[in-house]
Amino acid sequence: MKNLINSVICVFFAISLLVFLTEPALAQDATKVDSAHYKVEFENDQVRTLRISYGPHEKSVMHEHPAGVAIFLNAGKGKFTYPDGKTEELSWHAGQTLWLPAVKHQPENLGDTTFEIIQVEFKVNETMTEKK
């Protein structure tokens, strides 16, 4: 009986590992699934500020962001792939600031230079919602 239980446990872990290695990552927190490109600069109960940096032609993995504001520190051009497979190419200039709705995407730097972005993500909590 003990050998059967050990065998079942081994099969369970083997299947779990196989699923983990073969399934595409579900959209997740960028700082957890791609810490090479996303660093937390500041965080409290209302906002989280990220420093985003992509070298030339670097690509991320599918991840998500809540709504927020992006400040582009230098010019760049990127390709964004969405969960449904659609893609979009965007370019921006240094100093540009944009409101960004919540999004799930996979970014890629299409340029030959590094780009950096500061992104302020807003957290929803009781202090930010109106009470009626």
Image (cartoon, rainbow, N blue to C red):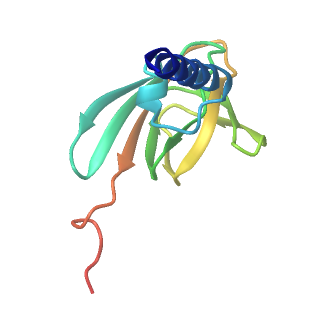
Viewer-proximal residue, 85 or 80?
A: 85
Q: Residue at x 62, y 39 (%)?
A: 105
Q: Position of residue 25 (x, y in %)?
A: 60, 31
Task: Looking at the picture, tell me which residue is in the foreground, 125 or 116.
Answer: 125
Residue 62 vs 98, above or below: the answer is: above
Q: Does residue 7 appear anywhere in the picture?
A: yes
82 relative position to 130: left or right: right
Where residue 71 sits: x, y (%)? 44, 38
The image shows residue 107 at horizontal and vertical percentages of: 62, 30
Q: Residue at x 51, y 31 (%)?
A: 94
**Residue drawn at the location 60% of the way across and 27% of the way down:** 61
Q: Note whether residue 117 is visible.
A: no
Q: Residue at x 56, y 39 (%)?
A: 27
- Count of labels shown? 0
Q: Quadrant of residue 8?
A: top right
The vertical placement of 8 against 91, above or below, is above
Q: Is residue 125 above or below residue 15?
A: below
Indicate the position of residue 33 as horizontal and vertical percent values: 48, 26
Left or right of residue 110: residue 25: left
Which quadrant of the view contains residue 114? top right
Which quadrant, please, contains the C terminus? bottom left
Q: In front here: 89 or 128?
A: 128
